[in-house]
Image (spheres, grey):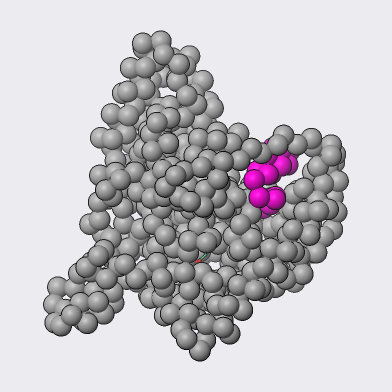
Amino acid sequence: MELEELTISQVHLGLVKKKFSALELTKTFLDRIEKSDKKISSFITVTGDLALSQAKKVDDLISQGKKIGKLAGVPMAIKDNILVKDVRCTAGSKTLENYIAPYDATVVKKIKEEGAVILGKTNLDEFAMGSSGENSAFGPTKNPLDLKRVPGGSSSGSAAAVSANISVFALGADTGGSIRLPASFCGVVGFKPTYGAVSRYGLIAMASSLDQIGPITKTIEDTKIVFEAISGKDPMDSTSLEFKSKKPNIKKLKIGIPKEYFLKGMNKEVKKVVEAKIEKIRKAGAKIQEISLPHTEYGLATYYIIMPSEVSANMARYDGIRYGYLSKKPGDLLNVYLKSREEGLGDEVRRRIMLGTYTLSSGYYESYYLRAQKVRTLIQEDFNKAFQKVDVILTPVSPTIAFKLGEKSTDPLTMYLSDIFTVSVNLAGLPALSLPAGKVNNLPVGVQLISKPFNENNIFKAGEILE
Ligand code: GLN
């Protein structure tokens, strides 16, 4: 096996047995970024010096005979909306093109303490708003499995880098599917933890009641290792919690298949791949049961009201004064704001600010934002009821395989439809994993496994059988 193909646990074993050094491994990956990433554009910033110095520290520990953790010396990448101290953090936007992060996000602090090697910051849809990876001010990321297609968004660079063996694993963030959709399109494992399981401190906020950081890896075993390292209560994020997930027994695992997720409009081949996986898990001894999540059809509409409302508030700080690009010739004070925002922010971001400002404005607040919050509760209750009967819910991640670059970028509504199977999970705050399930026209299809809050082990158990 080539060095770049190794998983986290294989890297760990290789380092401990001294088959290769962390420095050698890191150089292999930096070399791959240099050579292979030109075609894919998965990185915005490469942190070569930081990576080499971290790798050297790990090699020193090994040569001194010290015990190293599972992530020590493992080359990895971080979505460019998560802060790494003294490194540029762009969020894929012109407005933050020259922004240098003043501190480490809590996940980054933890990853550094574990000794992981940070290769750089990965491309994303601007401020994580998008489903294809095409909305970045630094140009689109391409799907490494077919360069004419999108990798999925918004954690486009993180998923593409892991898929192309340019990074062993990566961190992404998921507000409505941004870890799971690109993982599915690129044929890797993507995990969105329970809301509150991982600290959001140092994550550039998109929609704060929905955002969650999580790993993108090659295997479920690797996902577990990263999740273990980054989760837990953080005094800097009051929505984070300490928790313990119980060990499940697969013979007793009940899997629910929600009938609302197998729509008419879904690609037939994708549906076949998902159904074959359901058969597989049935044969492994799990009990399969049809369930109903009756408010599923309102998920997308609810998300596309609540999310932009929160976005419009979170984006207020990029005014050219507090944060972000300042217009060169603004004229008067009002135009400092107007022109800086107009010139610094892309179309999709401005569209969402306008939508969110509208849904929160007096006279419309009750009919849109408040109403959407009520539907959000109904969606949560659907899941609560379902989890009285089953332990894990299995669905497709997306109704299609990776689509062509440019195919949906001029039609926002068609683009939003890509999120139809992923957004309800964020509205309900649940953990969910995207796992490669098979291929259609040689391109990967993912299945989604969802569980009760803080029951991530049920997902991992079911996922290991499918894997
Ligand atoms: N694709 C969804 C959106 O555009 C989700 C984005 C995300 O999870 N960050 O809003």
Q: Is residue 377 above or below residue 49?
A: below
Q: Nearer the viewer, residue 273 or 311?
A: 311
The x and y percentages for residue 78 are 40, 45
| Left or right of residue 80, residue 304 in this image | right
| Left or right of residue 349, residue 422 in this image | right
Task: Say if residue 35 shows up in the picture.
Answer: no
Quadrant holding the C terminus: top right
Q: Is residue 328 above or below residue 202?
A: below
Residue at the (48%, 20%) spot, across then down: 14
Residue at the (51%, 69%) spot, across then down: 307
The x and y percentages for residue 134 are 42, 64
**Which residue in the rendered view is the most extreme toward the top?**
65
Task: Say if residue 362 shows up in the picture.
Answer: yes
The x and y percentages for residue 93 are 32, 63
Q: Nearer the viewer, residue 196 or 112?
A: 196
Give, as a single range, the part of the protein colored magenta: 444-467
The x and y percentages for residue 236 are 42, 47
Q: Is residue 261 above or below residue 9?
A: below
Q: Is 449 covered by the magenta stretch?
A: yes
Residue at the (31%, 23%) spot, across then down: 56
Q: Is 61 covered by the magenta stretch?
A: no
Residue at the (67%, 68%) spot, across then down: 377
